[in-house]
Amino acid sequence: MPDETGDAIRFIREATKGPGLRFEDELVSHLPRLRRVAHALARVPADADDLLQAAVERALMRRDQWQPGTRLDAWAIRILRNLWIDTVRAQGRRRETFVPPEEGDAVGRQGEQETAVELHNIGRAMGTLPPEQREVIALVMVEGFAYREAADILDIPIGTLTSRLVRGREALLTALGEAA
Amino acid sequence: MTIDPETLAAYADGELDPLSARRVERAIADDPAFAAEVERHHALTARLRGSFATLDTQPMPAGVEALFARPDNVVAFPVRKPAPKPQRWWGAIAASLVAGLLLGQLVPRSGSDLGFEGGTAVAQGNLARALDTQFASTQGAQAPVKIGITFRDRAGALCRTFETGTTGGIACAGNKGLWRVQALQGGAETTTTAYAQAGSPIAAVLAQAQAMAAGDPLDAAGEAAALKGR
């Protein structure tokens, strides 16, 4: 029902939002988390940075849709994940099933090399997982979201979340060469 | 006794209710294979966390930074806030720290309780000392740093909530490592005694601690045992 009531409600929401910079300040504080999630989802670092930028831009644009008092990080992650799903769909499964070898050479500066290689190996192993397992691993294992919170962000039942978590974890251990 | 993999994972993540958790603990006591499985889960979690945490030391992509750099969106780093914000200023200080890192303007003062190690905030000085040695049950009312709850996160790191002045936060440390500050919350009212009400900065810190914790907070004995290792 698009009528003047909608505008009135939007106006009230604006008015109760408090001092101007709060949204940006809080969003900035969640950038490290958003970046980690972006890198856990997208397999190529350059894609992850593009994804992060697109998500932050959209979050800033759609700030009116965020309900103050709810978790901004969860809201922003939902935006990021929707963008990511769009690109996964666009690229199709073909690119999701193997990592081109030329992306296999992580080069870091002295001293950073070891951590860069480790992150690269983890990223590669994550890349072998189906997207629906990868997103569960990203939220629960990497970011430490409670099952309930992660299931809400992903909009899936908690039973689905736990079974994807277990399958994803096993697949990840296999990909890392640590299968029992 | 059989424990399905989902239940075991949920136990490792601290997601089981106390009754189910005790059932799993009995199974673990009977069968070391279950214990090994939980250990494997913790090890993988720690490895994933540690690996993605290395991203935090790198500057944000210029394109992302630019989104916040418009004049109407400038996030300044206030050395001292003129007045505490009334309430729910969640992340103000953490945001300032991040903004400081982004814009390269943050200069840690000597003698400060916070320093920077590889791009993340770490406790030092009085704060580090309190985190290392102070017990919640025996600390004096006048202690400059107050320790709140102590817990383990899902990667097994030791975490403690603290308050100092008008700032509260959470710091976590791996085995004998530095205390990395995971959350900071400014604006706790010192002029009023009712600063632990729901919706207050301290309540927000506690809510975040609860979300991070695997299982219940450590009791006094657990706290003492955990600090002994440091």
Image: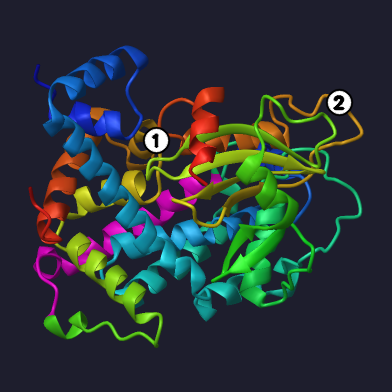
Q: Residue flagged by tag 1: what amino acid is it?
A: Ala
Please indicate whether residue A163 sits to the left or right of residue B190 in the image: left
Taking the image as shown, residue B165 lies to the left or right of residue B53, namely right
**What secondary structure is the stretch in magenta mostly built from?**
helix
The chain under label 1 reads A
Q: Quadrant of residue A27?
A: bottom right
Other-residue count near label 1 (Cα within 10 Å), few / some / many at <14 / 14–19 / ≥20? many
**Side (left or right) of A23 relative to A51:** right
Q: Residue furthest front?
A: B228
In the image, residue B214 lies in the stretch drawn in magenta: no
**Residue B91 visible within the image:** no
Residue picked out by circle 2: B193
Identify the image quadrant of residue B123.
bottom right
- Where's residue A101, x and y in %? 12, 82
Q: Secondary structure at mark 2?
A: loop
Please tell me in which quadrant of the rendered image residue B154 appears.
Answer: top left
From which residue to which does the magenta span run?
A72-100
Using the image as rendered, state which of residue A112 and residue A69 is in the foreground: A112
Q: Which residue is mark 1?
A: A146
